[in-house]
Amino acid sequence: MQVGGNAKLQFFEYESLIFHCEGSHDSTGLKILHRSKGELFKSQTTVTSKRSSCTIPTIFPEDSGQYWCESRDGKRSDIIHITVTDGPVILESPISVVEGETVTLRCRHKTTSTNLSADFYKDGRLIRRSSTGNLSIPSVSKCDEGFYNCNSGGRESAESLMAVQGETHQCYQIKFKNTCDITMC
């Protein structure tokens, strides 16, 4: 069972949010569930086909939280964490990342469509400065998993988890005194 939709994890307030749940041939009664601040919400419709969708035409920060799909027979998709902000910057990152793919993260401003310079962080540490506002990670691996966010013009996005699906590799981190870290997989 899978959850999909707008293909990103962070949204500006007043954007629309579309979710699709897709199940296997034996999944019936697909529902979209959402947990925010400890409260559980269920989509109003249950369908008996392989696909269910839910649209929230206008989203607000209180719509932030966990979303997942569940079938009548108890099968669940992975949980995705959606963040809705009334702030000026978001990090656009894909919902699903498969090992070996090239992934592009984008630092986006609410008021401008032009690319502005941005600093990108992984697990709270600066990993790259970009003059285009984009961070491309070629041949992504499990070692690239972590919480990412960006900062542009002194404005910071929320963090989003980038989870990588695929083979597991052992990662080692080498720390150099007062300089930098290298992660090897």
Image (spheres, rainbow, N blue to C red):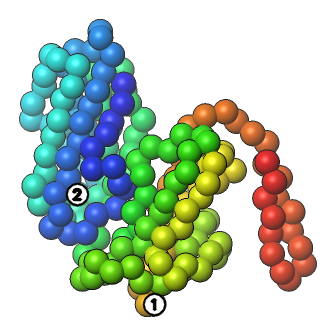
Which quadrant would the N terminus be assigned to in this image?
top left
Residue 96: quadrant of the picture: top left
**Residue ID for mark 2:** 63
Is 120 displayed left or right of 5 in the figure?
A: right
Q: How many marks?
A: 2
C-alpha separation, residue under disc 1 versus residue under disc 2: 26 Å
Query: Of the residues shown, which amino acid type is indicated by label 1?
Result: Gly
What residue is disc 1 on? 154
Question: Residue 178: horizontal and vertical position, in percent?
Answer: 85, 83
Q: Nearer the viewer, residue 95 or 29?
A: 95
Residue 31: x %, y % from top left:
21, 29
Earlier in the chain: of badge 1 and badge 2, it is 2
The vertical placement of 175 against 161, above or below, is below
Please determine whether, in this image, residue 21 is positioned above or below residue 159. Answer: above
Q: Residue at x 67, y 33 (%)?
A: 167
| Residue at far bottom of view | 153
Residue at the spot x=28%, y=77% of the render? 113
* Residue situated in front as seen by the camera: 16 or 81: 16
Residue occupying image coordinates x 28% and y 63%: 11
Give left or right: position of 140 versus 41: right
Which mark's residue is nearer the viewer, 1 or 2? 1
CB atoms of marks 1 and 2 within 8 Å: no
Q: Is residue 73 visible?
A: no
Q: What element does badge 1 sit on?
A: loop
| Residue name at image x 84 percent, y 81 percent | 179
Is residue 109 visible in the rendered image? The answer is yes
Q: Position of residue 83 (x, y in %)?
A: 33, 61
How packed mark 2 is, by other alpha carbons closer than 10 Å (few <14, some 14-19, many 20 or more), is many
* Residue 46 drawn at (x, y percent): 13, 25
SS category of the residue bearing label 2: helix
Q: Is residue 66 above or below residue 146?
A: above
